[in-house]
Amino acid sequence: AYDCGMKFNIIRYFVDTHKVRLTVVPFDYDLEANPSNIPWEGLFLSNGPGDPTMCPQTIKSIQYALELETPRPIFGICLGNQLLALASGAKTYKMKYGNRGMNQPCVDLRSGRCYITPQNHGFAVDSSSLPPMWKPLFINANDLTNEG
């Protein structure tokens, strides 16, 4: 898990509820060099504050993971979603007000189901800049911004 400002409850949820073996690394950990020789089967990209373009080391590691011959799962929430989008070649932008609060409606585009989510981010993924094989899975019902 890349720690970009991750809350402990996320770690607890993965480990206690889903029995995931989780190794947390700092946001600037070089995955290609992997200096700590950490075995990994997938990546979790955490939430965190700020402009995702200010994390070039993280984006470089995600690009490395995306280019592997045998793909591995990558899951990003909030800032992690934005970092994954940037690594794919998409763009992000600063929102006028951001999505902030405990009751943000988030629509699953596969099912149409709406989830009420806590959010606190001021940047969003430009869905029109996603690569051809990529598509949004979730959007904010209030402003239609990409949520994943």
Image (cartoon, rainbow, N blue to C red):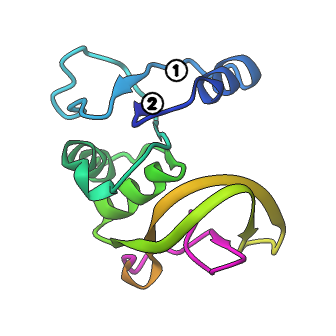
> Crowdedness of circle 2 by 10 Å Cα count: few (<14), some, many (20+)?
many
Q: Is residue 12 left or right of residue 80?
A: right
Please indicate, yes or no, whether residue 116 appears anywhere in the rendered image.
Answer: yes
Q: Kindly identify which residue carries mark 2.
A: 1
Q: Give, as a single range, the part of the protein colored magenta.
A: 130-148
Magenta run includes residue 97: no
Q: Kindly identify which residue carries mark 1.
A: 22
List the single residue furthest toward the top. Answer: 36
Q: Residue at x 18, y 18 (%)?
A: 35
By secondary structure, the bulk of the magenta-drawn segment is best described as loop
Earlier along the polypeptide chain: callout 2 or callout 1?
Answer: 2
Check residue 143 in the rendering and tell me which mark sits there, or answer none. none
Q: Is residue 11 left or right of residue 113?
A: left
Q: Amino acid at mark 1?
A: Leu
At numbered mark 2, what does the secondary structure look like: helix, strand or loop? Answer: loop
Asked if the residue under mark 1 is in contact with the one under mark 2, i.e. CB atoms within 8 Å, the reply is yes
Position in image of residue 19 (x %, y %): 69, 19
Q: Is residue 144 left or right of residue 56?
A: right
Quarter of image, res 12 = top right
Position in image of residue 101 (x %, y %): 68, 56
Quarter of the image with the N terminus is: top left
